[in-house]
Image (cartoon, helix red, strand yellow):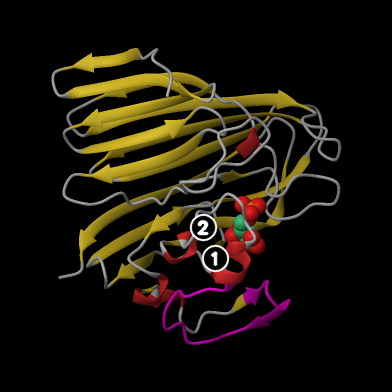
Amino acid sequence: MSQKTLSIVEQRDVNVTQSTNNGIPILRIEHPQCHAALSLYAGHVLSWQPKGHSDVFWLSENTHYQDGKAIRGGIPLCWPWFGAKEGEVNHGFARTSLWQLTKVTSSDEGVEVVLTFEGDAKAATWPFAFKVTQTLFFGEEFSQTIDIANTGEYDFEHDGALHSYFSVSQPEQTCVPELSQVRFFDKLDGSEKTKTLNDCRGPKDRIYFTHQDVQLLDYGLNRNIKLSAHGTSTWILWNPGTESADAMADVHAGGEKEFVCLEAGFTEPLTLSAGDSVSIRQVIKVSHIS
Ligand SMILES: O=P(O)(O)OC[C@H]1O[C@H](O)[C@H](O)[C@@H](O)[C@@H]1O
């Protein structure tokens, strides 16, 4: 961390500061309801620890904080595409671009941060003009709203996901009951199927065709993470398992046994007409199971 720390909000019991890590601007929030951190590079939530709980998000000890590389953990925003695209980076360029800090406000309930990212022709295969506004609320609850505007003259197609990495006791001790028996696309073998979901152990890479509210129940931590999503159509459940994780330089040794990704996605390309905008949102609440 650099020695320079800029104070953004300084009130009784509330502190929001900006510092840098390897040149990357990081915002840290201390509020009676929670502690949190985010990176302006990638517009990326790194941490949210509501009062009485350990961090809800997992962040790799080996993550890069480096221009052009994605941050491993927290909530990468996959946009304007989800997954692989020929000749392009995986999961789009929003997670490898610098965002602007637009506004920080604090109340008794928590801290709201607004970030923006706009541009034109940011990728060879995606020559469009856009503005994305991300509104984050960190308190006893967490919410994330992404407003995407097509600011150009041409309609475009886009897809994406809020790729949340949840910190868990171990994937074997966690489950998402609402996804059991729901039809999914299995990215591991390219087939569609329905199965009982007993736990989240990897390798799993599934796109579930539902956007209903879900719960990530972690019996090891006695924690229930409740998620609701709006403007999305799928939940992606991902854990790489040990063999794949060992091949990922930015996952620390054994890291795959500490997280489960449950991602609010819109994984089928949608058309956004010139001049139009669309909003996607997730709300996360945590409680003890018993
Ligand atoms: O390694 P990344 O590009 O961050 O992708 C990590 C993972 O993201 C999603 O969950 C996809 O469904 C997976 O197929 C992918 O491996």
Relative to 247, residue 31 above or below: above
Which of the 4 image quarters holds residue 124? top right
Please provide percent x and percent y for residue 101: 48, 20
Q: Is mark 2 within 8 Å of ligand 1?
A: yes
Where, quadrant-wise, is the N terminus in this rendering?
top left
Q: Is mark 1 within 8 Å of ligand 1?
A: yes
Which callout, 2 or 1, points to the residue nearer the camera? 1
> Magenta-highlighted stretch: main secondary structure?
loop
User: From where the camera sits, is residue 209 visible?
Assistant: no
Let me know if residue 82 appears in the view: yes
Q: Which numbered marker is on residue 221?
A: none
Q: In terms of depth relative to the viewer, which is nearer, 156 or 285?
A: 285
In the rendered view, tell whether residue 272 sits above or below residue 219.
above
Q: Is residue 86 magenta?
A: no
> How would you rate the neighbour count of disc 2 (Cα within 10 Å): few for under 14, some for 14-19, many for 20 or more?
many
Which residue is labeled 1 in the image? 238
Say which residue appears at 21% left-offset and 59% top-offset.
287
- Tell me whether circle 2 and circle 1 mark residues in contact (CB < 8 Å): yes
Q: Position of residue 165 (x, y in %)?
A: 46, 54
Q: Secondary structure at mark 2?
A: strand
Q: Is residue 188 magenta?
A: yes
- Under mark 2, the amino acid is Glu
Where does residue 66 sit, x and y in percent of width and height?
61, 32
Pointer 2 or 1: first along the chain? 1
- How many residues crowd around disc 1 within 10 Å: few (fewer than 14), some, or many (20 or more)? many
Q: Is residue 62 left or right of residue 290?
A: right
Disc 2 to disc 1, how far (Cα)? 8 Å
| Residue 97 vertical position relative to residue 142 in the rendered view, above or below | above
Q: Which residues are magenta?
A: 185-205
Q: Which mark is residue 263?
A: 2
Element carrying mark 1? strand
- Which quadrant does ligand 1 occupy? bottom right
